[in-house]
Amino acid sequence: MHTDQLIACPTCDVLNRDEDVKPHTVARCARCGTVLAAPKSGAMTRIAMLSLTALVLLAAAAGFPFLELRAQGLSHQASVLDAVLAFSSGPMAPLSLATALLIVLLPAARYCALIYTLAPMALGWRPAPHAAAAYRWAERLKPWAMAEIFIIGVAVALVKVSGLARVGLGPAFWAFAALLVVTILTDNAICRLTVWKTLKTRSAS
Amino acid sequence: MENPENPQRFLTAAAAGLAGCRVCGTANPGGARACTCCGSPLAAADPASLQRVWAWLAAGLIAYVPANVYPMLRTTTFGRSSENTLIGGIAELFSHGSYGVALIVFFASIVIPVAKFLAIAYLAVSVRKLAALGSHGRLVLYEVVEFIGRWSMIDVFVVAILTALVQLDFAAAIAPGMAAVSFAISVAFTMLAAQSFDPRLIWNAESENLNDHA
């Protein structure tokens, strides 16, 4: 049998036969159960559109007012940039850079890479140059893109503060909340091995 | 799960003289350095790679100590300043009656990090010999650790938001403490430890052990 007809399970290395999988069914590794293929009709289009949505929401989250604190006649506004710069004074400055990367820059980079790889697929075109490298990076960045964790952190912080002061929620807060939903939808729509297979067949043809 | 008593039925890419790619699943010809499909570097499952796991894990463990000792937050209200450690912050939430949030923070900053250290250490140790927990159980453990590890970063974000938000001049101001940095470093290192663990090793121990008995 030719090696093209085999899939080595990325988790346990067992060779599985690469058969055509019907849409909306799931093929799993015979030994460890890792999902090897989960084709969904229109998945590429959906992922590309969700990534575009996420990018717009990220831009809105970074630009619009985020939170406002009011207590005893005093008020203070904080943007997402202020949250990033919270550690900027003194020896903690590198943590500011890390926060900026984790909550805005890396998610943005990941969504750009996803659009770059998958938009040509969705339109039925040949993959863009270096699409494989871009998609590899999108997958590598995934654990480090923490925009959705940030918004849960915001919720915890709001509960801590709510006893002491009134908090006003700005558009950036809702943009981040929507981003949480969009991120979960995107991650559920992506089947890694199916994307690789599509990339492989499209670049060959 | 279909055939747990006879794992020999399965042929791995390595046993067939091929090099399986851990990124895209392509079965490359043996000896290939980079995957022909996605260009990722290829490496056979090697127990020596566990040294990387142990190194990141030790670094994460070391960084977790100051994260607990030093203050996470420094709060100044009307000229009086107080410092809160990780545990102190949770105790305060609890005494305010926010049990739900106290529980979330307790899980994110104490239970998950400690459980993660133990789980990664267990996975790395159990590669050498057949463990009490079967291969499938350990695979689930590995996937849970990989999925949940990043959520510990919540604590660092809470500090960032509180610092940005609570700046009411004299009335109340919050500044971050050194523990925020060491906690972030600890979470990042443990994430790297989990990522350097090669799940293919879980199954290697199983087949080697069977060969010994045969």
Image: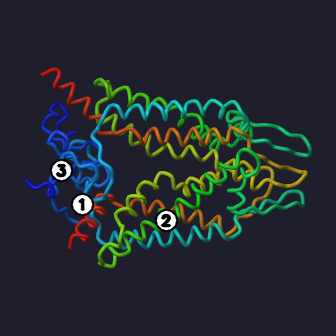
Q: Amino acid at mark 2?
A: Val
Picture layout, residue A115 above or below residue B12 = below
The quarter holding residue A58 reads bottom right
The residue mark sitting in front, 3 or 1, is: 3
Q: Is residue A61 left or right of residue B201?
A: right
- Residue at (75, 59) in percent of width and height: A167
Q: Secondary structure at mark 2?
A: helix
Chain assignment, label 1: A
Instruction: Tell me how many marks there are.
Output: 3
Quadrant of residue B6 in the image?
top left
SS under mark 3 = strand
Is residue B203 found left or right of B145 in the rendered image? left
Could you tell which of marks 2 and 1 lies nearer the N-terminus?
1
Q: Nearer the viewer, mark 2 or mark 3?
A: 3
**Farthest residue in the left direction?**
A1
Q: What amino acid is found at the position of numbered circle 3 in the picture? A: Pro
What percent of the width, then of the height, locates residue B1?
22, 39
Q: Position of residue A47 (x, y in %)?
A: 40, 68
Q: Chain of mark 2?
A: A
Instruction: Identify the residue at image location x=82%, y=60%.
Output: A70
Which disc is residue A25 wearing? 1
Q: Position of residue A163 (x, y in %)?
A: 77, 50
Q: Amino acid at mark 1?
A: Thr
Q: How is the image coloured?
A: rainbow
Residue corresponding to mark 3: B29
Image spot of residue A166 (x, y percent): 79, 58
Q: Which residue has dot 2 on it?
A: A182
